[in-house]
Amino acid sequence: MWKEEYDVHFDFLLDLLDANLLTDVLSDSESELGGLEQLERGSTETLANGCRADCDAAKRLAKRLFYLEGFRRCDVARHLGKNNDFSQLVASEYLSFFDFSGLSLDKALRNFLKAFPLMGETQERERILVHFSKRFCVCNPTALAPEGKSRSKRDDDDDDEEDDDGAHTLTCALMLLNTDLHGHNIGKKMSCQQFISNLDGLNDGKDFPKDLLKVLYNSIKNEKLEWAIEEEEFRKSLSELVEEQYEGGGKRGVARVTDGNNPFIAIPILPNAVTYKHGVLSRKSHADMDGKRTPRGRRGWKKFYAVLKGMILYLQKDEYKADAELCEGDLKNAVRIHHALATRATDYSKRPNVLKLKTSDWRVFLLQAPSEEEMMSWIFRINLVAALFSAPAFPAAIGSMKTFCRPLLPSSSTRLNQEDQLQSHEGKLKQMSVEVEEHRKSPPSPSPKSREWEEYRIKEHYLIYEKSRYETYINLLQAKMRAETDDLEKIEASVMSGIGEGRGGREGYLRKTQSSPSISQHDVNGRASGRTGPGQQS
């Protein structure tokens, strides 16, 4: 695969990194760099004329970047990846501060990626990785010697260049492998044998040592590559969760909650968030992130006091009290319901009154309610909150690989009013309908057990699910607008009366179990904007 499309796949790799790395932000030191930028522009012309480059200036800048003297870590990449001779000198000098001697390629790469955030344009990041590969080969002359070829010293320029290319190829392969094994793509992960086969003949026309590739594969499989993150930029990436003030002048905190391998998952504590429902639920974890089946030891049923507050379903061990503070255990069990879908668990018959909750990252929970009425009420309220407040999805990433990857879904609250939110959902429904039709027009070659067929089925399942989710959102928003009220109990009664008529006109299908909160487009965090959309009362 990489033999024929290496360059294309490398570009795709760097596109994938855009989803996991932070965007480039200028530091306060930007204003101090006018002289350096002039030097960079002038050095290209100077070198082109055959004159000596200002190596001393490059060394000084590289040292300042390495020791972060007047710079932040997020400043480093843009000074190493520019397409001029001065930046190349700076990058070479910067890498000279790293001693990779005796380290395997994966360990050297881990150390390098933790030094600064690898940000910038595709070409800029590629140039930086080339410098890393060269430095690794300088420190480890024979580490990647092809099978059947050994060399005790590196005194040949051609051999140097060949080794650099091999190291660069393998570096890109490791980063692709990291994305395949630990990314948000669904489907089968790359096996060790596939990893080895993909690299056949890519080490100066020869093979990399198989034992080396096996060690590298297991290293990435057992421990994902971690990227450096500037603390200030990390806080900015969670800006929608860490606003210092909420309406009323009080402060709200954010609790850090570990969720899988994603360091950005956080559960906000929002004291003024509206409580839309609470009651007893029993929970069973059915699938973890990306739809992976939950290990058998963690599938048991557990009883909780559930609270749907804002866009979070809190599962508490203690009985619900409106003014009680949440403990750490409650936060760890919390489930964010942005872009989620709750449905009756028709395929589960071991217990009655069970609903299925599928989250934006494709975790699946089974939730048992005390009665059918309560089950239907939970389904309605979870879906309505998700429909009203989930921010529009980002456009899907475009890449050259055929492996299907689900788009990332934002966890922040929408900024659209009710009418625009409905139009957004309708637009996504039309898009999904078209994509389903287009997808079914191009089935893979007739081999039901092939990788292509598996990818085809995975994408079709995703498109059909998304189509169903947006249909549900649209129906609920339309029902809310027809009800011409923000009283959640009245909206629910209106929706359920229609369901009751479809079931034979069962009266009293819903029993009022608690005081009825209101639900409007901008009260998810306890803040009202004053705007009134269709069907909303001011």
Image (cartoon, rainbow, N blue to C red):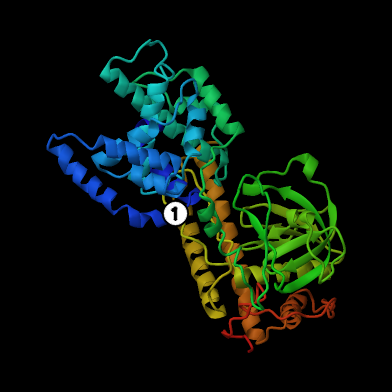
Residue 113 relative to residue 498: left or right: left
Residue 290 relative to residue 53: left or right: right
The vertical placement of 405 against 382, above or below, is above
Residue 9: x and y in percent read 39, 39
Q: Would residue 469 be seen by someone viewing this image from the given angle?
A: yes
Nearer to the camera, 373 or 238? 238
Residue 186: x and y in percent read 57, 45
- Please name the residue shown 49% across and 60% down the image: 394
Q: Would residue 400 be seen by someone viewing this image from the given angle?
A: no
Q: Residue reaching furthest bottom? A: 538
The residue indicated by pointer 1 is 23
The vertical placement of 498 against 163, above or below, is below
- Please name the residue shown 71% across and 74% down the image: 274
- Please name the residue shown 74% across and 83% down the image: 490
Residue 11: x and y in percent read 37, 43
Quadrant where the N terminus is found in the figure: top left
Q: Residues within 10 Å of mark 1 (few under 14, many from 20)?
A: some
